[in-house]
């Protein structure tokens, strides 16, 4: 499990912080990472990084020694049927709910103590997103993305709305 944070440039815009699960995070090189993003009720990450590129990833140790790892960088969205998709998609298991791949070039890595992060026991992944996508079908997911994923809460466009 990890967290992704982005924000619009507007001081009145909404900051986005999203937990991510599944086997979706990859280190592509010493300074580049990516994660497979599944369809959800919003698409804030895509809108924010399209506007300004800023993205932060946070990983917390929930067992063993306490530790927090943050990766700061500039990101971009890669959609299916774009030139970069084929190469990047080869690093992942593409799921029925797959929406896009978020790539980030990391310019700062920071660790902190994590002393206040509680201990948790991992019991498994949820399969809700996969079952939801299978039930909707390809056409249903595409319709949903057009209805719910083409702009941010603050009205910023996403890569889906621009076809990038």
Image: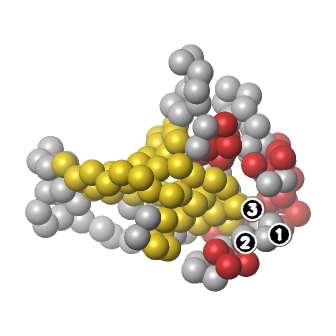
Q: Residue at x 44, y 56 (%)?
A: 106
Corner quadrant of residue 44: top right
Mark 3 → mark 2, Cα distance in angstroms: 6 Å
Q: Are marks 1 and 2 in contact (CB under 8 Å)?
A: yes
Residue assigned mark 1: 81
Q: Quadrant of the C terminus?
A: bottom right
Q: Is residue 126 visible?
A: no
Residues marked 3 and 2 touching at CB (< 8 Å): yes
Q: Position of residue 67 (x, y in %)?
A: 18, 56
Image coordinates of residue 8 in percent, x first then y, are 59, 30
Location of residue 36 by image quarter: bottom right
Mark 3 or mark 2: name the one nearer the start of the chain.
3
Residue 78 to residue 156: above or below? below
Kind of element beneath mark 1: loop
In the image: residue 123, left or right of residue 77: left
Residue visible at 88% across and 63% down in the picture: 139
Disc 2 element:
helix
CA gap between label 1 and label 2 equals 6 Å
């Amino acid at each position: 499990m990890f967290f992704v944070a982005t924000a619009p440039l507007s001081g009145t815009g909404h900051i986005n912080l999203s937990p991510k699960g599944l086997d979706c995070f990859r280190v592509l090189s010493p300074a580049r990472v990516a994660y497979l993003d599944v369809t959800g009720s919003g698409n804030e990450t895509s809108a924010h990084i399209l506007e300004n590129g800023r993205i932060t990833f946070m990983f917390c140790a929930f067992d063993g020694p306490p530790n927090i790892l943050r990766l700061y960088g500039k990101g971009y969205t890669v959609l299916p049927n774009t030139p970069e998709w084929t190469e990047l998609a080869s690093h992942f298991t593409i799921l029925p709910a797959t929406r896009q791949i978020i790539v980030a070039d990391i310019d700062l890595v920071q660790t902190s103590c994590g002393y206040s992060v509680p201990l948790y026991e991992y019991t498994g992944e949820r399969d809700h997103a996969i079952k939801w996508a299978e039930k909707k079908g390809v056409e249903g997911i595409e319709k949903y993305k057009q209805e719910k994923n083409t702009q941010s809460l603050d009205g910023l466009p996403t890569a889906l709305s621009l076809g990038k």
